[in-house]
Image (tube, rainbow, N blue to C red):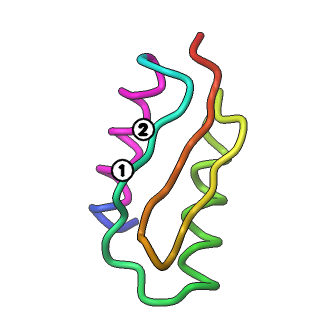
Amino acid sequence: MNIRLKFLFLMLTVCLAMSSESSFKIEGMVCEGGCSYKVKSIVNSIKGVNECSLDFGKKVLTVNYDSE
């Protein structure tokens, strides 16, 4: 797994305890289909995540999750 993805998941884990929606700047994606799908699949598999959306053009990941 890419070191940037590992760092992203660490940041997500920390932010999950703070609020119910957070946005993250994503760098390093080169393809809209495969990269976006992979990131969304991994983030959606994290316990407590309700949904996530990824804007490939803006390179922003928005995560909605349970704050508990």
Q: Residue at position x 49%, y 56% from top?
A: 61
Using the image, determine if residue 33 lies above or below residue 42. Answer: below
Q: Which mark is residue 8?
A: 1
Mark 2 closeness class: few <14, some 14–19, many ≥20 residues within 10 Å: some
Q: In which quarter of the image is the C terminus?
A: top right
Drawn side of residue 1 relative to residue 4, left or right:
right
| Magenta-drawn stretch contains 10 | yes
Q: What stretch is highlighted in magenta?
A: 5-17
Q: From this viewpoint, which residue is outermost toward the right?
A: 50
Question: Mark 1 and mark 2: span between their CA atoms?
Answer: 6 Å
Q: Residue at position x 63%, y 56% from top?
A: 53
Residue 41 appears in which quarter of the rendering? bottom right
Which residue lies under the disc numbered 2?
12
Residue 40 appears in which quarter of the rendering? bottom right
Using the image, determine if residue 22 lies above or below residue 24. Answer: above
* Label pair 1/2, CB-CB below 8 angstroms: yes
Q: Closest to the observer: 49 or 57?
A: 57
* Relative image position of residue 65 (x, y in whole percent): 62, 29
Q: Is mark 1 on a helix, strand or loop?
A: helix
Residue 29 appears in which quarter of the rendering? bottom left
* Relative image position of residue 42 (x, y in whole percent): 59, 55
Q: Residue 48 carries which label?
A: none
Mark 1 closeness class: few <14, some 14–19, many ≥20 residues within 10 Å: some
Q: What residue type is labelled 1?
A: Leu
* Relative image position of residue 18 (x, y in whole percent): 41, 17
